[in-house]
Each structure stands twice: as structure tokens, then as C-alpha cells.
Amino acid sequence: MTDTTITTDTTTLQETAETQAIPPQVTWDDVRKIRNDMLLHAEQLYKFDFPEELLKQFQDYKQALRDLPETYKDLKDLHLIEWPQEPSTHQDLQLSRLG
């Protein structure tokens, strides 16, 4: 039996997006809810002191999320949506520079 529960936990949202595990019976309202939660999560990560390149990555990521309904407007099986990948955070960049 397939679990069709949609969660708002940000880790699960990202995993859902990465694995495209949205059940086929999900509606556009469900997709928008997930997308909006992902946008909110991105806003919480977004820092104005990010390097310019990372700021651009976050802006592009958020725009791609906003564009999902238009990009996939003719898609019948919503589980086939290719979700944009969230950029690395500032902390990830700092850690990678140390290692």
C-alpha cells in the first residue's frame, strides 16, 4: 500500500523532491503546498551575507520553484515533476573550505 501522506518537514520535503516520490493522485494544490514549504525553507536558509554566487543560486532556485506550475502545466502525472535542487548553505561552503 502506498503512503500518500504529504508532510511539511523540510528534510522530508527535500527527500520527496529529490526522489520524485509524490504519489500520482496528488493534485496541483498538493504540489503547490510542497513548493511553498520548500520556498519557506529556502527563505529561512537565505542570508544576505552569502557570497554573490550563492545568492544567485538561491534566487535561481526560488524562481524555479515559483515557476513549477507554469513549467509543468501540461503534465498529467505530477509525480514526474523534476524538483530543483536546493543550493548548499553558507555553513556547507565554510566547511568545504576548511577541508
Image (cartoon, rainbow, N blue to C red):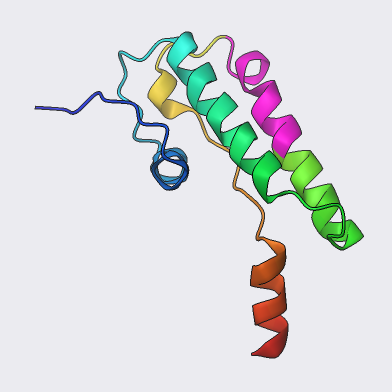
Q: Which segment did they paint magenta?
A: 62-73
Residue 12 falls in which quadrant of the image?
top left
Residue lying farthest to the bottom in this orientation: 99
Describe residue 50's horizontal placement relative to residue 67 as left or right: right
* Quarter that holds the C terminus: bottom right
Residue 94 position within the rendered picture, expressed as x and y whole percent measured from the top left? 72, 77
Residue 8 position within the rendered picture, expressed as x and y whole percent measured from the top left? 42, 32
Residue 7 position within the rendered picture, expressed as x and y whole percent measured from the top left? 36, 31
Please tell me whether residue 66 belongs to the stretch shown in magenta: yes
8 vs 90: above or below: above
Asked whether 9 or 18 is in front, the reply is 9
Instruction: Name the residue at 69% across, 89% down.
Output: 98
Instruction: Name the residue at 67% across, 69% down.
Output: 91
| Number of numbered markers | 0
Residue 50 position within the rendered picture, expressed as x and y whole percent measured from the top left? 83, 60
83 vs 25: above or below: below
Please tell me whether residue 82 belongs to the stretch shown in magenta: no
Instruction: Name the residue at 36% across, 28% down.
Output: 22
Describe residue 59's horizontal placement relative to residue 92 as left or right: right
Residue 49 falls in which quadrant of the image?
bottom right
Instruction: Name the residue at 59% across, 10% down.
Output: 73
Task: Assign the magenta stretch its main secondary structure.
Answer: helix
* Quarter that holds the N terminus: top left
Describe residue 86's horizontal placement relative to residue 56 as left or right: left
Asked whether 17 or 33 is in front, the reply is 33
Residue lying farthest to the left in this orientation: 1
